[in-house]
Amino acid sequence: MSSVFFILSLSIVSFLLPSISSHEFKLDGKVLVLDESNFDAAISSFDFIFVDFYAPWCGHCKRLSPELDKAAPMLSGLKKPIAIAKIDAEKYSRLATKYEIDGYPTLKIFMNGVPTDYYGPRKADKLVRYLKKFVAPDVTLLESDSGVAEFVEAAGTFFPIFIGFDVDESALSKVAIKFKKKAWFSVAKDFSEKAMDLYEFDKAPALVALHPSFNEQNVFYGPFEDKFVEEFIQQSLLPLTLPISPESLKLLKDDKRKIVLTIFEDEKHYESKQFIKLLRGAASANREFVFAYVSFNQWQEFAEAFEVDRKTSLPKMVVWDGNEIYFSVIGSEKIESEDQGSQITLFLERYKEGKTIEKTFGPSFFGYIISLLGMRTVYILVFLVAVIFLIATIGKEEPLVVGGRDRSELAAAAAVADSRDERASYDKED
């Protein structure tokens, strides 16, 4: 009887073994290929796993694939390794729906099973440097000037960097955990006067905020209580002046401040660069706003939403709520070439006094919205419009004529969306 039981048990184990082993994953420096049968197991098997939701025909996905192959062995060799995986989101549509995939490629990093959207670089070396921050300590302790320099170098330019010189680690720990996905945090306990000169602070404790890619830094001298530290960090996550692009707009989504937006003809012109310097001074003194700028030549669709065309006298300043409403300031509709610093100050004073005209975006903003949406979302919206229109026209005497017109309009909208696909946010295709 016991031998029969043993044979039966062995048969059951043999039957289950293939399914168990099929969900075992090894970090061997290769990109894991996932499907619906092993996706959840993979996510739970690694503390950190970077997932590429792709479509086989997507050009951007094809260009990304070899970069992921290069990055995989570098990330798997970290002290806290990061796995890289990919899944055909078009084939496995259930998972695509679950994780709200509306364009290709969509990239997410799962940290202990919790997904976070990835908007960083896609070249292998930069992707590795970017992802390292997800496994870095919440607050890094630095013991010397060279340690500070090495930390700044390793952090790169994709996130703001906060260094607390002689700041108690406990003053940063809570806020560092809260903003870990958006910034680097460190505490320097031993540093020289040379470091003080380099990072432009004259006493300690001091919390320095760096934006390497914008060559900007700000200093906070306290009080080092949770409320005030968090307020400084929240306001310093963005540079003093933010150039608007499809990518940088994502940085504004969690910031509740109004946006003082300046529209230039071309931000590369000497006059524009001088004006941006003045904006930085105003931004430093008015941290309750986000100061941003955009060029008509670089992003015409966006500029046109604020009633700007090639005949408009530029630069032009408005205050934008980040959604569909913006404010024109009475008496400051035009910025003259003389004494522009005073004109910026007057613009802000008049806005705070309520001397404004509230406006909403016009039809030209439709093109801008399409340029940011994944194509699948566009098609869904077009489909819903078509259904609503069809319901509204049921029972009319000439439904075929109306329906024909509707189809031509939808085709035109799809053509517009398709022509802007290459400018879609974060290079997604559909």
Image (tube, rainbow, N blue to C red):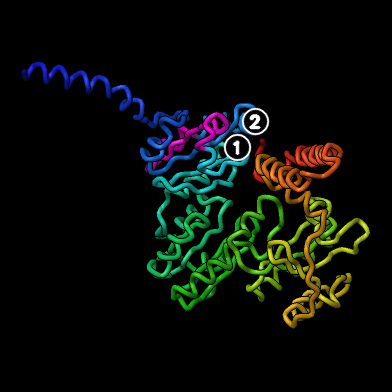
Q: Is the residue 311 above or below the residue 88 in the image?
A: below
Q: Quadrant of residue 209?
A: bottom right
Give the residue drawn at x 72%, y 68%.
260
Q: Nearer the viewer, residue 421 or 282?
A: 421
Amino acid tagged 1: Pro
Q: Position of residue 36 (x, y in %)?
A: 45, 31
Most extreme residue toward the right, as rendered?
Answer: 311
Q: Quadrant of residue 390?
A: top right
Q: Nearer the viewer, residue 259 or 361?
A: 361
| Secondary structure at numbered mark 1 | loop
- Answer with left or right where residue 205 lies relative to residue 7: right
Q: Residues within 10 Å of mark 2 (few under 14, many from 20)?
A: some
User: Is 92 a magenta residue?
Assistant: yes
Q: Position of residue 101 (x, y in %)?
A: 57, 41
Amino acid tagged 2: Cys
Mark 2 or 1 closer to N-term? 2
Give the residue drawn at x 51%, y 64%.
195
Q: Is the residue 54 above or below the residue 12 in the image?
A: below
Q: Is the residue 196 above or below the residue 417 in the image?
A: below
What residue is shown with label 1?
105
Q: Position of residue 316 (x, y in %)?
A: 83, 66
Q: Position of residue 122 (x, y in %)?
A: 59, 39
Q: Residues within 10 Å of mark 1 (few under 14, many from 20)?
A: many
